[in-house]
Amino acid sequence: MAPSHADRSFLFLQGPHGPFFSRLAEMLTHAGARVWRVGFNRGDEAFWPDRATYIPFTDPGTDWPDHAARLLDSHGITDLVLYGDTRPIHAEAIALAKARGITVHVFEEGYLRPYWITYERGGANGHSRLMETSVDQMRRALKDLDLDLPDAPAKWGDMRQHVFYGALYHWFVMARNQRYAAFRPHRTLTVTQEFRLYLRRLALMPLLWLDRVQATYRIKTGGFPYHLALLQLAHDASFRDHGPFDSMDEFLEVLISGFADGAPAHHHLVFKAHPLEDGRTPIRADIKRLAAEHGVTDRVHYVRGGKLARLLNDARSAVTVNSTAAQQALWRGLPLKAFGQAVYLKPEFVSEQSLSAFFQNPSRPDSRAYRDYRHYLLETSQISGSFYSSRGRRQLLRQVVDMMLSPEDAYDALDAGRPAPRQHLSLVN
């Protein structure tokens, strides 16, 4: 007889922009579980069509902890589901859930993005179990397994859908949010400002593409050795909550100063912007100013997003705070310097040199150790698919629902010799 999940009650909080959470809830309902969704604004409500299971939170944010505690208790919640674990409403709910023994399911962008997403229990990024797991422990868990590791894809995969759903979400919050007058976004910009940035990026995509192609061409044909700086969004939780810098400008200053002090005079430094960089931070102007101050203007370049592989393939090394793009650098065996907390921050493959020494003569990673680490992630937290494209969602749902319903966390299952089944990556390409 098929197992019953009638004793499971899932409470969804905020998810990725778009319909992924509602599709996931449908699958859990078909499996016999109960589902509920708390919405904090009109954007949350718009992507949850089942009004019977939708719970609007319209009170001030200061009332949320007490409200969340009542919801967890009155609905008999056994599982909490959310996207990102650092925004205040999620962090507060996670603390309440863990105190009650409730399973916390955390979704995030893939550590091995773009054709994987991250699914973990308890926490992600700096709160992930991976932070405390050594490469030797991973190797012991993998000792009886074999896997032909797929290469790191060269492109994001669903950028247009990602930007479209982001713009649509913020339009609902900006234009239809009367019911949620007390809502305050977890970021510093207003919803109107966020919406305008999404529209601006959509409108400028052809010009941004042309600028990116020209900048990449100049670098590829320049014939100079270069180091690649993998930039992140200044408002992203990984940069903000798991990094040592108070601002992007502070990171740029440290990086350009270290490059000017340590890199050979014929080397160049290339800054690669995050694919979703929207101009809210004047990165390009700051780079130009700092390069001039340190006398390296002619050796510093800026590229607006684009395919990372085109720049990584010829790079001398890579530097970042804690961007997941660093995984592609390690996959290629490139020396890597990272400043923040990251799940890949292992001594076997991340340099512990000072920044100036790194730019002068970067130490190479242990590629065997990184392959084992990557294998471990693909057997546990990395699920092929995506949140934003319909094809990627279908692929993701084929795998992640069973993992959520399993009594075992993916890490515990692998340790016990019971890894979750995996589908072939080519199905999402």
Image (cartoon, helix red, strand yellow):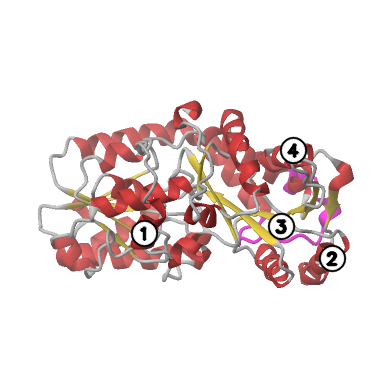
- Name the side, left or right, on which 64 lies relative to 164: right
The spot of residue 257 in percent (x, y) is 24, 67
Numbered circle sitting on residue 2: 4
Query: Could you say whether the residue bearing mark 4 is in a helix, strand or loop?
Result: loop
Image height of 219 relative to 135, above or below: above
Crowdedness near tag 1: few (<14), some (14–19) or many (≥20) residues, C-alpha within 10 Å = some
Mark 2 lies on residue: 73
Badge 2 or badge 4: first in the primary sequence:
4
**Residue at 44% across, 67% down:** 132
* Cα distance in 3D space between marks 2 and 1: 50 Å
Mark 1 lies on residue: 286
Badge 3 or badge 4: first in the primary sequence:
4
- Name the side, left or right, on which 159 lies relative to 354: right
Mark 2 and 1 residues: CB-CB less than 8 Å, in contact?
no
Name the residue type under label 1: Asp
The spot of residue 194 in percent (x, y) is 61, 50
Mark 3 lies on residue: 80
Mark 3 and 1 residues: CB-CB less than 8 Å, in contact?
no
Query: Could you say whether the residue bearing mark 2 is in a helix, strand or loop?
Result: helix
Type of secondary structure dominating the magenta stretch: loop
Name the residue type under label 2: Asp
Name the image quarter holding residue 369: bottom left
Q: Nearer the viewer, mark 3 or mark 4?
A: 4
| Magenta span | 172-190
Mark 1 and 4 residues: CB-CB less than 8 Å, in contact?
no
* Cα distance in 3D space between marks 2 and 4: 28 Å
Name the image quarter holding residue 223: top left
* Cα distance in 3D space between marks 2 and 3: 12 Å
Q: Nearer the viewer, mark 3 or mark 1?
A: 3
* Cα distance in 3D space between marks 1 and 4: 59 Å
